Image: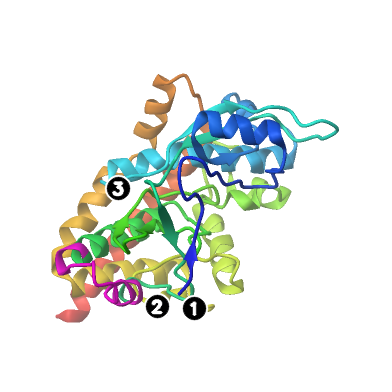
Amino acid sequence: MKLYSKCKNNNNFSSFVGLKIANEAYKNSMLANKSSFIKTYSYNSFQKDLYGSRTNLMRNGRMANELLIPHLFWQCGLNAVEYFPWKMPKQENTQQPNNGLSSKNALEQDEKFLHLTGLRSIPEVIAYLNTFNSVSKDMLKDIEQKLFVLSIVDFLTLQSDRNAGNMPISVNKSLTIRFAKVFDNEYAFCCEHFGSPRFIENSGIKKDEVNIDYVISEFNKDLKTGICTNFAPNASSTTLNATYKDVAESIANYATEHPHLLPVLYRTMENLDISKAANCLAAKGIEICPQYISYCNAIVNSGKMQILQELENTTKNEK
């Protein structure tokens, strides 16, 4: 199992979406800011409305997700990388936008993120972590609970890109393991489809009423084609034939099979609040358009109802 280094220490940095990190102006700016992650898409136009070019809509959705979703993880008891608007130095002879997002360093000194290649379920991750001598039973229990919360939030936000390279579990030179900050949440709420006029029209994202059935049908297509690399409690829900309902059922079954996690499931669903997250951002002067908040709310509420339905079905089957 190889280690995956996003940033080793305060003198290192990482880039997303095509930033040329060899550029000295970027490098010096990043080091001065002690940043670990940056996003180079502009989010500014998303403050007003959802209109504009399809490319900008998709990019703005990704930026809005990075701003919103950390607040959701905080509501549910997990730490997460917080992004801030950041004016980046312009590169010469390029169309690269210079209004982006930056985060403070996500790791402690001499830490790396574990690259959990091939591990797509909670039992698989826990079994692997159990091979580290530094990991106690209590620590494994704590990480299991946090992975469960991660899988719930990812499901409720239609996260389509939780993969081996962005699992928030770190290790240091002493091989000490910890659950670090959750990061890389941009591909949530099906925003990768915002470049499609058909999706924009049929999803209702620009209207007062969101077509949840259509959004879920598109999400199911992503699951079946492998475009969506969701992380679910049970491995059976990460196969190519999985559906949105399968992932909800996996969450419900895992909580039922591990009764100590049932209160965690209910508490996570109760605490997760999109509108509250948007209000926290607004208090910092970061406005995200009401249409997108309504769209995200509809998706989250649908997910909560689906999990509750699967819990009810599980209870009936046990009887």
Going by the numbered disc 3, the residue's amino acid type is Leu
Residue 10 at x, y percent in the picture: 46, 40
Determine the CA span between mark 2 and mark 3: 23 Å
Residue 318 at x, y percent in the picture: 17, 80
Out of 124 and 223, give the one closest to the viewer. Answer: 124
Going by the numbered disc 1, the residue's amino acid type is Thr
| The magenta segment | 124-139
Task: Note whether 223 is above or below 19 in the view shown.
Answer: below
Residue depicted at 42% across the width and 31% down the height: 278
Residue 88 appears left or right of 160: right
Q: Which mark is residue 239?
A: 1
Q: Residues within 10 Å of mark 2 (few under 14, many from 20)?
A: some
Is the residue under label 3 in contact with that under label 2 (CB below 8 Å)?
Answer: no
Residue 73 at x, y percent in the picture: 34, 45
Q: Quadrant of residue 135?
A: bottom left
Mark 3 falls on what kind of element?
loop
Q: Which mark is residue 42?
A: none
Residue depicted at 51% across the width and 53% down the height: 6
Residue hosting label 2: 235
Task: Note whether 223 is above or below 49 in the view shown.
Answer: below
Mark 1 falls on what kind of element?
loop
Q: Is residue 129 magenta?
A: yes
Residue 42 at x, y percent in the picture: 65, 32
Out of 221 and 148, give the one closest to the viewer. Answer: 148
Is the residue under label 2 in contact with that under label 1 (CB below 8 Å)?
Answer: yes
Q: Is residue 138 magenta?
A: yes
Residue 273 appears left or right of 315: right
Q: Which mark is residue 78?
A: 3
Going by the numbered disc 2, the residue's amino acid type is Ala
Mark 2 falls on what kind of element?
helix
Out of 177 and 153, give the one closest to the viewer. Answer: 177
